[in-house]
Image: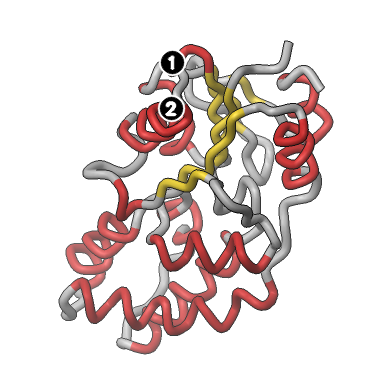
Amino acid sequence: MTPKAVFWDMDGTLVDSEPLHEAALVAAMRNVGLVPPANLHERVLGVAAWPVYEMMRDEFGLDLPFDDWIIRKYEHYLPLVERLQPRPGAIEIFNELRAKGVAQAVVSNSDRMIVDANLRMVGLTYPGMKTISRNDVREGKPHAEPFLRAAYLAGVAPAQAVAIDDSWPGAMAGLAAGMKTIFWPEVPMAGPPGAIVINSAEELRAQLGL
């Protein structure tokens, strides 16, 4: 049965932007004389900008205010957006749900300027589209607030909604919000307890009753 509402993570779920974020982060780190660790991808996947900055500052000795650091990172990221591709199958499912009248929103831990740039690049913009960025909430994922904000804007109860995310913090946020949570990682892995783990767009379609 198709749910009443579906709330999508953006980076890594709707669009294949995680490699771009990592490349920009690596470039920004090297630009200020820091050496990226081998496990950088695992440590920053799905994590908002401020906790990543705290890690850079506390563990790697970053000596810049947050505002200066994030400008440097985005100066590296935004030129890469031209390479951005949708995650195979995801936007097609989004559009099919939209045609069926299912309420949807994009719920991201990224800043507003990144959300807007990414969605515009893959053509996923339309009047009335609901998007929640890290700038729109007090607490980012893994806190429930971003997904609860989406439910409020969509006018549905959290239990009537499905949250889809590729990262542990995002899936934990969906679960904390009381939503059916689908964990669709970029590479097969176990998900948070309570999440439904899938590994393909075909499995996602089945979970959404399409």
State the image quarter where residue 58 is shown. bottom left
Residue at horizontal 33%, vertical 60%? 49
Q: Earlier in the sequence, mark 1 or mark 2?
A: 2
Query: x, y (%) of residue 59?
Result: 23, 64
Q: Secondary structure at mark 1?
A: loop
Crowding at mark 2 (Cα within 10 Å: few <14, some 14-19, many 20+): many
Against 97, is 16 above or below? below
Query: x, y (%) of residue 1?
Result: 73, 10
Q: Is residue 161 left or right of residue 208?
A: left
Residue 10 has which mark? Answer: none
Residue at horizontal 69%, vertical 28%? 101
Against 59, is 79 above or below? below
Quadrant for the C terminus, please.
top right
Q: Amino acid at mark 1?
A: Ala
Disc 1 to disc 2: CB gap under 8 Å: yes
Q: Secondary structure at mark 2?
A: helix
Against 187, is 120 above or below? below
Measured Cα–Cα span from mark 1 to mark 2: 6 Å
Near-viewer residue (93 or 65):
93
Residue at horizontal 79%, vertical 27%? 205
Query: x, y (%) of residue 24?
Result: 49, 76
Q: Is residue 6 left or right of residue 115?
A: right
Residue at horizontal 80%, vertical 44%? 92
- Mark 1 sits on what residue? 157
Residue 151 has which mark? Answer: 2
Q: Amino acid at mark 2?
A: Ala
Against 11, is 93 above or below? above
Query: x, y (%) of residue 85?
Result: 72, 63
Identify the residue at the far front of this view: 127
